[in-house]
Amino acid sequence: MYEKHFGLTERPFSIAPDPRFLYMSRQHREALAHLLYGVGEGGGFVQLTGEVGTGKTTVCRCLLEQLPEHVDIALVLNPRVTALELLGSLCDELNIQYARDTTSIKALIDVLNAYLLDSHARGRRTVLMIDEAQNLSAEALEQVRLLTNLETTREKLLQIILVGQPELRELLAREDLRQLSQRITARYHLDPISREETAAYIRHRLQVCGASATLFNDTAVELIHKLSAGVPRLINVLSDRAMLGAFVEGKRMVDAPIVQRAAREVLPEEGLDVPVQGKWRWLAFSAAVVLAALLGYFLAVTVPLPEPARLAMHTVEETPRATQSSPVPAEPAEPSPQPAATVPEEPLPEPEATSMSVAAVEPSSGDGPVVNSLQQALAQAGPDAAAKAWKALYSLWGVRASVVNDEQACAQAPAAGLRCLQGGGSWTVLTNFDRPALLLLVAPEGRRVPVLVREVIGSEVRIQVGDRRLQVPIDELENRWFGEYRLLWKTPPGGYAALRPGDRNEAVKWLRDRLARATGLTSIAPDPRYYDAGLRQLVESFQRDRELNADGVAGARTLINLNNLDQDASVPRLGAAVADS
């Protein structure tokens, strides 16, 4: 109704879940990272809680989109069921055949266990996600706990994610459910977003719909944040009704009075009160804004400016806000210095490749459109962005490779003594790896663009989008990144991707030597090439010290951490380990 009035392509504040409007605050990204970490580690429980409307569903949708192809997901959306009905729902979600008239929990457990063992043998992983888990009965919760007993000698067969309102935390804190609570390997609680994030949230949704100017003034944003308490769903409801109110009044800017009237229509009365002190503050602030505007207008029309100044003012006024360095910059309540802008860099020559070349390919010339911001670079990225990013990543390792997609890129890695690691996590996880990595960033139109993160410099990061390199603030990059990464890492002798108890090879001896250098401890063994119980204890101790999953298996994360202790010039570093990020 009001779209044409504001020059928008569609309504920006619909409460329907549309991935194009996805905006995740820092805590939403952290919540997603916790979920991805829990799923990646396998086994046990992952818990996500938050008040109604804080974005739990948004985070879960992101998680489902980022699950690897070898992961099967079972969703239980109605947890008000008995233990038998819960097992039946799980079997239905996984397309497991069972006798529909059975009343035996054991019969369902047997067919479920057989399915999970078969999936594990085929290299697949199964995840059960239960929404509104605070509604689970004690009987159903106990059955959920017992599901984690389905396991092999090495790992759990079922990963369980519990999503619910704050009552879920209270439920799991009960003494009779302590065994379940102790099995939770990752937990996160979503709080409402801040005032700055509310401003960024509103701005982001408007930009997706084509807005090139601010449609909500500072006082309107401040009041929306107060009335919504920072709950995204309420922000949508209030903002949508406020824009309708502005349209009816013929205004092109939403102000605080319009928001107040909108709130009376869509919020319960108890949520409408603004403290008296706050009202006086609003009046004072609004008066100051009006006086400042009048004074500025008077000076502009009465005091002549030098020609260069007039030209500068003209240029600034005609520059659309959408071309700023950040697609969703935080708008401060008071004037403050502008954030660091994206700094474009000229393409640099790729490093010389070594004899480990996989396939000879000419390095990119770097010719391409000049870009001034991350948003613009993502919008201009072509369908070959993934191939160019992988080629540049291999080049950092001194390898020439010809790739088109992730599958080809990872298939070529072993020939160069490397392996490909794909996963999800937070910026902290990435900096701990300390390796250049490919991240999937969300472009303005909603598609995901592979971007190479080459180097971290303080609070900024050097990236490559297609043929172009830019230096952008880490916060700006994180606003468009939801945790997915791909990176290359160097394997031990023999190209082993993981070393386990019972293995016997030269790589095990290499592992002993690296651990001895890292910890100063050694495990005496008749055969240093054999992975015995003593070596497992050393590996588990090393993993605990670095907050890794202490399972005694030297996998990719453990081996990367060991490699980080060496000053190997052939291994490219992100430079993030000492960065102030």
Image: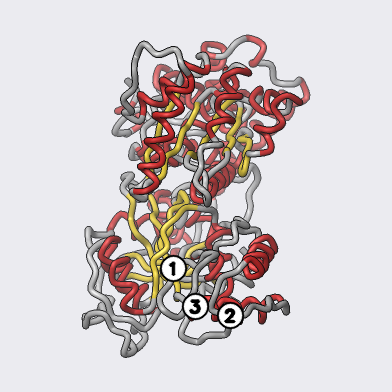
> Which residue lies at the image location 29% right of the left edge and 62% below the top edge?
386
How far separated are the C-alphas under marks 1 and 2? 19 Å
- SS at circle 2: loop
**Residue at image mark 2:** 528
Image quadrant where one finds the C terminus: bottom right
> Which residue lies at the image location 74% right of the left edge and 21% below the top edge?
275
The answer to which of marks 2 and 3 sits earlier in the sequence is 3
- SS at circle 1: loop
Q: Picture quarter containing residue 197? A: top right
Frontmost residue, 272 versus 282: 272
- Few, some or many residues within 10 Å of mark 1 (<14, 14–19, 20+): some
How far separated are the C-alphas under marks 2 and 3? 10 Å
Tell me residue 82's x, y (percent): 52, 14
> Which residue lies at the image location 51% right of the left edge and 64% below the top edge?
555
Does 240 sit left or right of 558 as displayed? left
Does 401 sit left or right of 512 as displayed? left
Tell me residue 536's x, y (percent): 62, 65
Give the residue type at disc 3. Answer: Ala
**Residue at image mark 3:** 507
Frontmost residue, 243 versus 201: 201
**Residue at image mark 1:** 497
How far separated are the C-alphas under marks 3 and 1? 10 Å
